[in-house]
Image: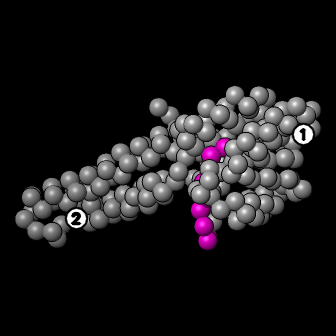
């Protein structure tokens, strides 16, 4: 299964892929080291150098795996509630934003014109800090005067989605896609 940002289950699929890649990278380095040691009888050989250099991408992959393990995606119950309410809106699932101070897990987001709505499950995301971080990132990305509303109350969020679906589309689809691309780029 291919991992596509914004789709439900993205974090789970990506976690599996990175786990396999990390094991493979460390396995190759270990195999090279073992082959060099067995053939020469000492650690001081060229294959040891190659094995140590092979640990660099393996460690980078391990860091990505640790981040993905910490990331919590959208629960199945939440998806069942929110998917039918999207209507004409394009729903983005399993978004995990990182900042220097904290990390923020949002289960669902939609972009419509100059309005961005987001839902984070209770106790998973510090919404006020997340909202400030996303506002800053949107401004740095060149998107001014966008209204960003995040909530952890699913009934309130469902009502906001219904209201947004009832309203007439105000923004251009290209501009909305640019905002989505920025959100995908700054998420894990």
Q: Residue furthest left?
A: 41
Q: Could you tell me which residue is drawn at 20 percent across and 53 percent down?
A: 31
Q: From what the image shows, is residue 159 above or below residue 67?
A: above
> Which residue is at the front of the view, 84 or 173?
84
Q: Is residue 30 visible?
A: yes
Mark 1–mark 2 distance (CA, rounded to whole Å): 58 Å
Q: Residues within 10 Å of mark 2 (few under 14, many from 20)?
A: many
Residue 88, x across and y down, in percent: 79, 29
Label 1 close to label 2 by CB (< 8 Å): no
In the picture, measured across the screen, residue 82 lies left or right of residue 33, that is: right
Which residue position is annotated with label 1? 171
In the picture, residue 53 is in which quadrant?
bottom left
Q: Residue at x 77, y 33 (%)?
A: 89
Residue 131 drawn in magenta: no
Regarding mark 1 in the picture, which secondary structure is present there? loop
What secondary structure is the magenta-colored segment mainly? strand
Q: Is residue 65 above or below residue 74?
A: below
- Magenta part of the chain: 100-109
Residue 134: image quadrant is: bottom right
- Label 2: state its secondary structure: helix
Vertical side of 64 occupied by 154: above or below: above
Marking on residue 48: 2
- Residue 10 figure quarter: top right
Q: Earlier in the sequence, mark 1 or mark 2?
A: 2
Residue located 60% across and 67% down the image: 102
Residue 40 coordinates in the image, percent (x, y): 9, 63
């Amino acid at each position: 299964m291919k991992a596509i940002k914004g789709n439900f289950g993205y974090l789970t699929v990506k976690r599996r892929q990175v786990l396999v890649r990390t094991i493979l990278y460390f396995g190759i380095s270990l195999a090279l080291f073992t082959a060099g040691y067995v053939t020469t009888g000492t650690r001081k050989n060229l294959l040891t150098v190659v094995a140590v250099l092979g640990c660099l991408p393996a460690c980078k992959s391990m860091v990505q795996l640790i981040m993905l393990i910490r990331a919590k995606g959208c629960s199945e119950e939440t998806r069942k509630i929110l998917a039918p309410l999207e209507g004409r809106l394009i729903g983005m699932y399993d978004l995990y934003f990182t900042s220097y101070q904290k990390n923020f897990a949002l289960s669902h987001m939609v972009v419509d014109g100059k309005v961005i709505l987001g839902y984070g499950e209770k106790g998973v995301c510090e919404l006020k800090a997340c909202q400030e971080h996303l506002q800053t990132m949107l401004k740095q990305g060149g998107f001014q005067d966008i209204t960003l509303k995040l909530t952890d109350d699913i009934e309130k969020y469902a009502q906001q989605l219904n209201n947004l679906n009832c309203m007439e589309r105000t923004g251009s689809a290209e501009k909305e896609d640019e905002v989505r691309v920025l959100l995908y780029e700054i998420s894990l």
